[in-house]
Image (cartoon, rainbow, N blue to C red):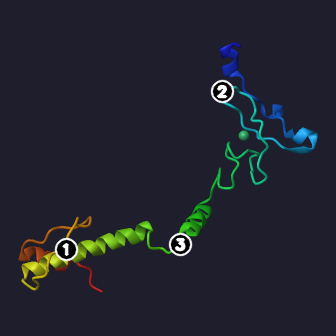
Amino acid sequence: MQPSIKASKKIEKSQYETYVILAGGRIRCLRCTAQSTRTKLQCGRPALLISRTQKCQFHGGGISSGKQTQEGRERITQSHIKHGESTQKVRLEHSRVSAQLSQLEDAMYLLNMTTSPRTRGRKPSGYKAIRSLGDIKQLILETETH
Ligand SMILES: [Zn+2]
């Protein structure tokens, strides 16, 4: 084999074998049109029926492969949501409220409103320690009012 010829060899669209014969000549079906990067030969597998581009399952013939619309992506996202508790929007909201709650706890200790044990563990992201009365005023001003 000569590598220089092999590298430049590319199958034209008209040279593709459209059909593949399987099961000893009993089954005739569409053949995958993918080309091997290593051997430059056409893939020998049958194409999937659902494939728009006549490809097998190893070369992007699946229903979700290829060009996708924004509407289709949103439909896929909606189908994967089971209860809505773990979407990114919900997680960010939970983190924001947790940080606010930790800051309120700090304010309660600063104002001697409680003597119960502090909440243990890592503070949520977005948490800023409340250490003075000025911080409490700032927290009240920043807090959204309903
Ligand atoms: Zn293939």
Distance in Å between CA atoms under marks 3 and 2: 43 Å
Distance in Å between CA atoms under marks 1 and 2: 60 Å
Q: Locate ligand 1 by image quadrant.
A: top right
Q: Of label 3 and label 2, which has the lower sequence position?
A: 2
Q: Residues within 10 Å of mark 1 (few under 14, many from 20)?
A: few
Distance in Å between CA atoms under marks 1 and 3: 31 Å
Outermost residue on the top side: it is: 2
The secondary structure type at the circle numbered 3 is loop
Residue pictured at 59% horizontal, 64% vertical? 76
Asked whether, in this view, residue 37 is left or right of residue 109, the answer is: right
> Which amino acid type is shown beneath numbered disc 2?
Arg
Whole-percent x and y of residue 114? 11, 84
Quickly name the residue at label 3.
82
Contact? badges 3 and 2 (CB < 8 Å): no
Outermost residue on the right side: it is: 26
Residue pictured at 66% horizontal, 15% vertical? 4
Any part of residue 137 in sight: no
Q: Nearer the viewer, mark 1 or mark 3?
A: 1
Ligand 1 lies under 8 Å from the Cβ of mark 2: no
Quickly name the residue at label 1.
119
State which quadrant residue 87 falls in: bottom left
